Image (cartoon, rainbow, N blue to C red):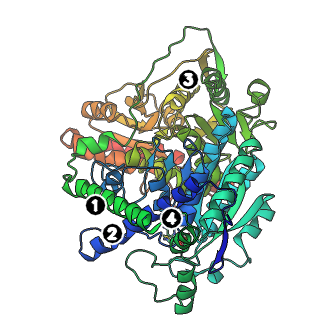
Amino acid sequence: MDKTADLFNIKYNAENLEDSTLLQLYKCMLKPRLIEEKMLILLRQGKISKWFSGIGQEAISVGVTLAMQQDEYILPMHRNLGVFTTRKIPLYRLFGQWQGKASGFTKGRDRSFHFGTQQYKIIGMISHLGPQLGVADGIALASKLKNTKEVTAVFTGEGGTSEGDFHEALNVASVWSLPVLFCVENNGYGLSTPTKEQYKCKNIADRALGYGMEAHIIDGNNIIEVYTKVKDIAESVRENPRPVLLEFKTFRMRGHEEASGTKYVPQELMDTWAKKDPLINFQSFLKNKGFLAEAEEVKIKKNIIHEINEHLDIAFKENNIISNETNELNDVYQKSIYQEFRCNSEAKETRFIDAISDALKQSMQKHNDLVIMGQDIAEYGGAFKITNGFIEEFGKDRVRNTPICESAIIEAAMGLSIAGIKSVVEMQFADFVTSGFNPLVNYLAKSYYRWNQNADVVIRMPCGGGVAAGPFHSQTNEAWFTKTPGLKVVYPAFPYDAKGLLATAINDPNPVLFFEHKALYRNTRQEVPVDYYTLPFGKASVLKEGNDVTIICYGAAVHWVLETLDKNESINADVIDLRTLQPLDTEAIYTSVKKTGRAIILQEDSLFGGMASDISALIMEHCFEHLDAPVKRVASMETPIPFDSQLEQQYLSKNKFEAALKSLLEY
Ligand SMILES: Cc1ncc(C[n+]2csc(CCOP(=O)(O)OP(=O)(O)O)c2C)c(N)n1
């Protein structure tokens, strides 16, 4: 029988497909359509809130999902209901998710399709659209490292391709030959912005050339074309790992969100594309060719509608979520039981920088799939030579030079974590973390709270001033992260602490920012055990004890405090080196302040919104009655960090500390 047809410019060719596959494709497309039709009614009745419609784009979600294997990851977007339904997520769970119920996937903490599920191998988006493209890189990297021969498919709209994440993700995937299908649904509009205001090239697929990547343009309204082409491409990528850019031409038939309307879309465009409806045309094709009898069609529809109603009923009947503050707070971080490793090995004098290098190397030996990534870290050994010699011992798969793509690499680290692999990312300088800020504070930090997916990632942050390196190589930017729930922040001042805390950071399943002050790298030495050991988070160290005043500090400032006290032997101070800022050892602070009645906090960062301010507030709130003087904060100037060393010395808080301390003692 002739299994081809041309309906409204949709050329169907089903010659290589089983009849049962054709029916499966149809049923899988019909289900999301019927769900949305039902939701439109419920929306009008005021029973549900708005969502992002995928009507007219079902062939892409369904075709891609069916072309993939069940255990391969898919990273869908806001219009990909068909991915979720085709992966057979029970509908009451989807409805529960949309209604913020417990049967959903986020315990009411996130909305619509913003969730992932390891059970169904679906990793949902965050609102920012782009970051998941790099996350797909990480998942694909894991599959390459484990040699599972699996493909990862990730979706974006054409609007999302204007984000930097898109370029970085494609570039990294191409340089590393990662098995990723980048699926761009080009549906004509990004919110109200037409494609001609979004990009200038003819086809988005043309961009692949610039990344040295293969690309295909696919009729996104033709389910057979989507399914067969993606199936073939996926098969070939499994055998020969590489990224492929797929541009699906389609159209957004409804407003950006229900029911925001489509006034800005010319009517003739709507009419043209209405004729190309992927579902109606495929149904006509199946009927014309005798694959779908009228009675069968009615039955299929009836069954799906029954299923939808039944599951909606379950979701509506489910009680609203009840939680409490403890519950919510307990889910910000994955529980990590601190494992203490002591070592009785000999100690030897070790520089700060070597302590970090040793911790990293010994952690690579202990966790034999731990991957480290960063610019110039392989043969070159990193900007500070911390990973010198690592590739000889661990190989280039595990010690990965990266392109200058901070966003994509932090996202890839997230992807590795999703696939069960730990990673450490080296920022060449802490300042450059801004180029990966979005995935860090929005994706890695929030994912455990949102859907219980941890980000087993350590970001190493060579930071700090005093080295005459100017405004972009000197910042100590811990305060950007200590205020973000979900991140842990470590900031050691001594080699012994640096080594033990880095080992703990790597063992911890949560995202940890590990600050390493560059000025300490080669200037601070200490006797440090040679073998592997860990130190706990959230435990400050009391370096000196005295009754006059509590001095609270961390990082290089600890050394500034000790120098000041060396010059002023008559001052009897408790010196608290915080070591970790999140978690913060408030107990150590309060105990000391209650004893001394005076507190001064020294930070290297400029004053406003820094650690010192919060610690000061905490002391006021918890120790007010014990205070004999106002709490003092000492911080650097409220300017960017100047380059010239005289200007820099003037900028740094180091020079203000002694006078501030004395004035506090005289109060
Ligand atoms: C970083 C960021 N900027 C802006 C938005 C607001 N926004 C959400 S969806 C969207 C349009 C996306 O267009 P496209 O990627 O083409 O996907 P489509 O909605 O057309 O499927 C915009 C502007 C956002 N979510 N994130």
**Vertical relation: 95 (above or below) 569:** below
Task: Identify the residue at horizontal 78%, vertical 28% (top origin).
Answer: 389
Label 4 with label 3: CB-CB less than 8 Å: no
Q: Disc 3 designates what residue?
A: 496
Q: CA distance from mark 3 to mark 2?
A: 62 Å
Q: Quadrant of the N terminus?
A: bottom right
Q: Position of residue 226 (x, y in %)?
A: 64, 62
Q: Which residue type carries mark 3?
A: Tyr
**Vertical relation: 416 (above or below) 23:** above
Task: Identify the residue at horizontal 45%, vertical 20% (top origin).
Answer: 339
Q: Quadrant of the C terminus?
A: top left
Which comes before the other along the chain, label 2 or label 1? 2
**Vertical relation: 337 (above or below) 43:** above
Which comes before the other along the chain, label 1 or label 4? 4
Q: Disc 2 designates what residue?
A: 38
The answer to whether 201 appears left or right of 343 in the picture is right
Which comes before the other along the chain, label 3 or label 2? 2
Q: Nearer the viewer, mark 4 or mark 2?
A: 4
| Disc 4, SS | loop
Q: Nearer the viewer, mark 1 or mark 3?
A: 1
Label 2 with label 1: CB-CB less than 8 Å: yes
Q: CA distance from mark 1 to mark 4?
A: 24 Å
Q: CA distance from mark 4 to mark 3?
A: 73 Å
Q: Nearer the viewer, mark 1 or mark 4?
A: 4
Q: Position of residue 612 (x, y in %)?
A: 40, 47
Q: Disc 1 designates what residue?
A: 309
Label 3 with label 2: CB-CB less than 8 Å: no
Which comes before the other along the chain, label 4 or label 3? 4
Q: Which residue type carries mark 2?
A: Lys
Mark 2 and ligand 1: say if the CB distance to the nearest ligand atom is below 8 Å: no
